[in-house]
Amino acid sequence: MMKNERNEKIIDIIRDIPTLAGLSDDELELIAPLFSEKTFRVGDFIIVEETQGNTMYIINRGTVLVTKSDRTGEQVTLGVLRDGAFFGELSLFDYLPRSATVTAIEETSIF
């Protein structure tokens, strides 16, 4: 994917993220290059519950499982996210530990 195509794809996705929806096109163009791409293998943890975070993620290609520990320590599935989905954005604003674990369930490319 060429750099401009990459930034356009990121802008199209982040334009629909509620916490970033108020940004102008110029502002979106400024932040798009801040996103880097990383690939995760099946079983790789992307986010671990209760750890500190300051990063949001956008799924470019792949699938992840979102889970949370219940009171007994068992993992409860909260959802499955695919291409174009985003997660982790709250840590940019609330500075609280991560509320869930996100694991790649197929090879996943993330911005």
Image (cartoon, helix red, strand yellow):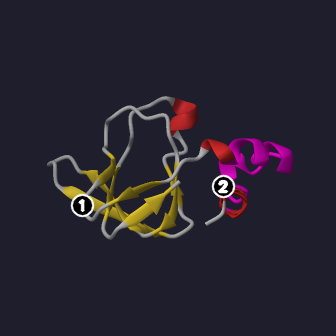
User: How far from the left and from the top, in percent, is residue 107?
Assistant: 35, 68
Q: Is residue 90 above or below residue 83?
A: above
Residue at the image point whose x is 66% and y is 45% from the top: 33
| Amino acid type shown at disc 2 | Ile
User: How far from the left and from the top, in percent, is residue 45?
Assistant: 29, 51
Residue at the image point whose x is 58% and y is 33% from the top: 93
Q: Looking at the image, how many numbered discs can be counted on the residues?
A: 2
Q: Is residue 98 above or below residue 7?
A: above
Q: Quadrant of the N terminus?
A: bottom right
Q: Which residues are magenta?
A: 13-32
31 in magenta: yes
Q: Which mark is residue 43?
A: 1
User: How far from the left and from the top, in percent, is residue 40?
Assistant: 35, 58
Residue at the image point whose x is 62% and y is 42% from the top: 34
| Amino acid type shown at disc 1 | Gly
> What secondary structure is the magenta-colored segment mainly?
helix
Determine contact: label 1, label 2, CB under 8 Å.
no
Residue at the image point whose x is 23% and y is 50% from the top: 70
Identify which residue, 69 or 86, lies in the foreground. Answer: 86
Residue bearing the label numbered 2: 17
26 in magenta: yes
